Image (cartoon, grey):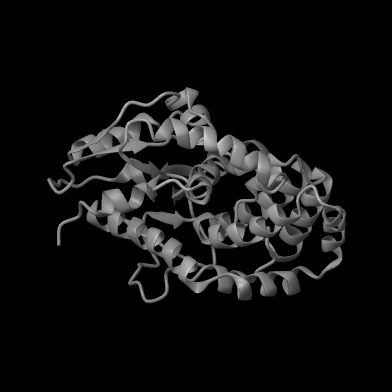
Amino acid sequence: MFNPRDIIDIIAGNVKATKNPFGIPKFLVNQWHKGVNLPQQGDAMLFTGLMYQFVPYIEKSTAYLAKYEDTPLAEYIRYAKYVPSFLSGLGLSMITPGSEKKKYNTILRNIARILKASKVDFFYRPDLDDYSGVLLYDLGDQDGFIQHARYVAQKLKQAGVKKLITVDPHTTYALKVLFAKYADSQFEVKTYFELTDFQSQNGHRRITLHDPCFYGRYLELSDVPQTILAGLDIDCAPIKNAGPFTSCCGGPAESISPKLSTEVGSRRVAELQVPGEKIVAMCPICLGNLKKIGADVEDLSAVIAGCIGK
């Protein structure tokens, strides 16, 4: 296990310097919208929080952490905070495979397709789509989170944004609960699957749906995707530990201890494999971690988008 203080210092320093935990310029991270005809005005703004975009970088950086965990070299991680954020960010961007970036961009494009098929009056502004800062809160840097959250909220307020459509549980919780508590911001927040509303008979399959902790325990939204999927003729297999009692994928621990993350995630994969159906995740952290452990898993957005007529 790495010293949590060292990891927190690195992440907090990157967020302060570049507004994201990896130090990568946003124009390099957020490219999914390019070439997609998205409106720039509407009733609600699609807010990705950059979480899906970060997954390829998370996978690359944690692979290095896993290599050096519990070795003498682990002590040197503390010196990473002295490297300028933009330099380390550019380096990480260069060594992260473009094919992986495209996979996660496709997920966001699927979500935009779902919103269009559901006749949702939404828009997208990449200049207003920022990282929520939720990892700072999760790791205990409350002051850093509050400072960053107020920055993000102020940008949205100045642009007149009142309604947000989110795509992942971590950002949803941050905007809906934490921003209201710490950033004096009351946005109307809905997940994209809560707004999914179209008819289809293309589903006709059975899946195993993994509930992420934030949707299952804290936001109590687990029943919503199941209802949406049932309307698309897709059944969810019953599993042990679901809804408010869901088991963690192990992802939240990967920056501190990749070994612990794999141990926790392996137990969850074993539970999810019992029904023998395709495993479906609805969180970028869960998706990346379950895949890393070896699970055959796809994103909820791909399942729903697959039901959209030609």
Measured as percent of width and height from the top left, residue 264 is found at 59, 35
Measured as percent of width and height from the top left, residue 34 is found at 42, 75
| Residue 221 occupies quadrant | top left
Whether residue 153 is visible, yes or no, is yes
> What residue is shown at x 50% (from left), y 56% (from top)?
52
Vertical relation: 302 (above or below) 244:
below
- In front here: 279 or 117? 279
- In front here: 79 or 160? 79
Q: Residue furthest left?
A: 201
Measured as percent of width and height from the top left, residue 22 is found at 68, 62
> What residue is shown at x 83% (from left), y 61% (from top)?
81
Measured as percent of width and height from the top left, residue 248 is found at 54, 34
* For residue 137, side relative to residue 220 (left or right): right
> What residue is shown at x 37% (from left), y 42% (from top)?
279
> What residue is shown at x 75% (from left), y 41% (from top)?
142
Whether residue 179 is visible, yes or no, is no
